[in-house]
Image (cartoon, rainbow, N blue to C red):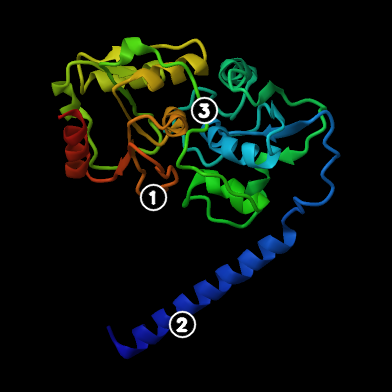
């Protein structure tokens, strides 16, 4: 590289850094005040709202526990907000929006089975103490870092992410199964699940299209449709091993702290595995080694 090109590159790098710093400071200056104007908390119940995605909502539960401080939690889902950062190839059960009326029906049995949750309903005109989606108004690069900690950064809180934050009764009919999910979103290039066909019982929870795609690679894969997210969580809690890419079911696996192997998306590695029995991978040989070590 010539001295001139080197100087230009150094100048451009410095300019980019300064520009990002200015944008960050501008973003902070325009960010909402999350500490003032919180409505009075009455009846020992704290009201939260969330606009999606579903996985983000699951990762926000530790923040709810930290902010509620032992009080009952009411969660209100904002419906029909447009999907963020999705391309046409990223198929999603809710289409072009993040939460729908169906989302409330799916989430309610799971959340209301948790001792601290009191309500799970659609957002209408309820008084909200904490809008969990306000993290998007802060100038952080949300293609990186732990999703749960995005909420910690926003509200100045913490919680032990190494311990469970969801409890369900396991479905023991899946004790011998590897439960898999591989959505059409966030697939890391070079990763194949084909080698799993040597294991006797593979069960997919997720979309029918994902099952049809997985069947091309693992012909004996079973499909387990679920009627709600409590049922999905019970299947994951009861399985021998969970394997999946960054997705809502993987958020459940992380919340339940089951034995789990998570495919990180190399460009947006935001599902950070914490605690016992958690593994992640971005390379095929390491993926196969982890599964082999677990399955024996």
The 10 Å Cα crowd at callout 2, few under 14, some 14 to 19, many 20 or more, is few
Circle 3 or circle 2, nearest the eye:
3
- Label 1 and label 2: CA atoms lie apart by 26 Å
In the rendered image, is residue 139 in sight?
Answer: yes
Tell me which corner region of the image, top left, top right, bottom left or bottom right, holds residue 177: top left
Which residue is pictured at 42% across the width and 82% down the height? 10
- Nearer-N-terminus badge (3/1): 3
Q: Which residue is mark 1?
A: 267
Is residue 180 placed above or below 268 in the rendered structure?
Answer: above
Do residues under tags 3 and 1 come within 8 Å of each other at their CB atoms?
no
Which residue is pictured at 17% across the width and 16% down the height? 200
Q: Which residue is mark 2?
A: 11
- Nearer-N-terminus badge (3/2): 2
In the image, taking residue 263 as reference, residue 152 lies left or right, namely: right
Q: Percent position (x, y) of residue 212?
A: 31, 17
Q: Nearer the viewer, residue 20 or 41?
A: 41
Disc 3 element:
loop
**What is the quadrant of the N terminus in the image?**
bottom left
Is residue 269 placed above or below 92 in the rendered structure?
Answer: below
- Label 3 and label 2: CA atoms lie apart by 50 Å
Disc 2 element:
helix
Is residue 273 placed above or below 81 in the rendered structure?
Answer: below
**What is the quadrant of the C terminus in the image?**
top left
In the rendered image, is residue 205 in sight?
Answer: no
Q: Which residue is mark 3?
A: 166
Circle 1 or circle 2, nearest the eye:
1
Disc 1 element:
loop
Which residue is pictured at 35% across the width and 12% down the height? 172
The 10 Å Cα crowd at callout 3, few under 14, some 14 to 19, many 20 or more, is many
- Label 3 and label 1: CA atoms lie apart by 28 Å
């Amino acid at each position: 590289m010539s001295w001139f090109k080197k100087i230009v590159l150094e100048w451009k790098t410095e300019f980019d850094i300064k520009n990002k710093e200015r944008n960050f400071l501008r973003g902070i200056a325009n960010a909402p005040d999350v500490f003032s104007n919180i409505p009075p908390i009455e009846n020992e119940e704290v009201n939260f709202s969330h606009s999606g995605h579903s996985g983000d909502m699951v990762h926000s539960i530790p923040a709810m526990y930290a902010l509620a401080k032992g009080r009952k939690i009411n969660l209100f889902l904002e419906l029909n907000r447009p999907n963020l950062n999705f391309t046409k190839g990223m198929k999603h059960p809710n289409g072009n929006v993040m939460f729908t009326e169906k989302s409330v029906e799916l989430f309610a049995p799971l959340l209301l089975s948790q001792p601290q949750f009191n309500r799970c309903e659609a957002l209408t005109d309820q008084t909200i103490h904490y809008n969990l989606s306000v993290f998007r108004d802060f100038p952080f690069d949300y293609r990186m870092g732990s999703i749960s900690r995005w909420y910690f950064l926003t509200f100045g809180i913490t919680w032990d992410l190494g311990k469970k934050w969801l409890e369900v009764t396991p479905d023991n009919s899946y004790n011998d199964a590897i439960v898999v999910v591989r959505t059409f979103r966030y697939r890391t290039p070079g990763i194949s699940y084909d080698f799993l066909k040597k294991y006797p019982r593979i069960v997919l929870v997720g979309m029918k299209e994902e099952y049809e795609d997985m069947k091309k690679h693992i012909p004996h894969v079973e499909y387990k449709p679920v009627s709600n997210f409590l049922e999905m969580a019970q299947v994951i809690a009861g399985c021998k091993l969970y394997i999946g890419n960054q997705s809502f079911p993987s958020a459940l696996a992380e919340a339940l702290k089951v034995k789990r192997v998570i495919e990180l998306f190399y460009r947006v590695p935001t599902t950070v595995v914490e605690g016992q029995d958690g593994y992640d991978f971005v390379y095929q040989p390491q993926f196969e080694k982890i599964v082999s070590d677990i399955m024996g």
